[in-house]
Amino acid sequence: EGAHDAGRFGFVTGGMRRQGRLAVFRGAVAQMVDRDSRLDGVQVLLVEDHELVREAISRLLAEYGAEVTATSGVAAALKAFERERPDVVLSSIGMPDADGYTLIRALRALPRDRGGQTPAVALTGLSTAEDEARALRAGFQYHVPKPVEARTLVGVLAGLAARSAAVRKSCRAC
């Protein structure tokens, strides 16, 4: 269990109790943070069903200055999306109740003025070229495989947040 969740980030925690695993994640996340890159004020909706992974990514993004709303599934994510109107969505693909493709289809069905063009990143353990092409065809702008590289993830989110700001600015006339 611990090694499975942690393996998504390249950490090995073996059979440690939850608190011990979380401490390992927090320590590793703190070491990954590059203080030169920032996501100050960027609102990120994170959708991840694995609690430890969700906590680790939330902490990572917060360390870079992002304002993170984290949910564990599609239904909660759609509610949070309507309420928060994030700059960018970061969603796991494989989730038990409904997958990331279900989420992106629902978001892309929204009108532009309700966030239908909000940039989105697929975060997944599926890392073949075919997996990436499927995510992009579905409506994600980027496909980021796990284990996640902090600088890559932050760079992608920063670029998409800039795009999101441009879309929102142009949508004021909508």
Image (cartoon, rainbow, N blue to C red):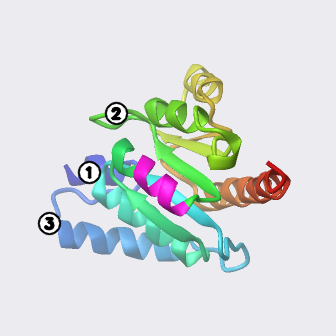
Query: Looking at the picture, how far across and down is residue 90, in whole percent?
Result: 54, 50
Q: Is residue 122 left or right of residue 76?
A: right
Q: Secondary structure at mark 1?
A: helix
Q: Residue at x 67, y 71 (%)?
A: 39
Q: Residue at x 58, y 58 (%)?
A: 85
Q: Which residue is mark 1?
A: 3
Badge 2: residue crowd in 10 Å (few <14, some 14–19, many ≥20): few
Tell me where the magenta segment starts and ends, as one range: 78-84
- On whether residue 61 falls in the magenta region, the answer is no
Badge 1: residue crowd in 10 Å (few <14, some 14–19, many ≥20): some
Q: Amino acid at mark 3?
A: Arg
Residue at mark 3 to residue at mark 1: CA–CA distance: 11 Å
Q: Nearer the viewer, residue 10 or 67?
A: 67
Query: Looking at the picture, how far across and down is residue 172, in whole percent?
Result: 80, 57
Q: Amino acid at mark 1?
A: Ala
- Are the residues at dot 3 and dot 1 in contact (C-beta closer than 8 Å)? no
Residue at mark 2 to residue at mark 3: CA–CA distance: 28 Å
Q: Nearer the viewer, residue 155 or 9?
A: 155
Q: Which residue is mark 2?
A: 98
Q: Nearer the viewer, residue 21 or 165?
A: 165
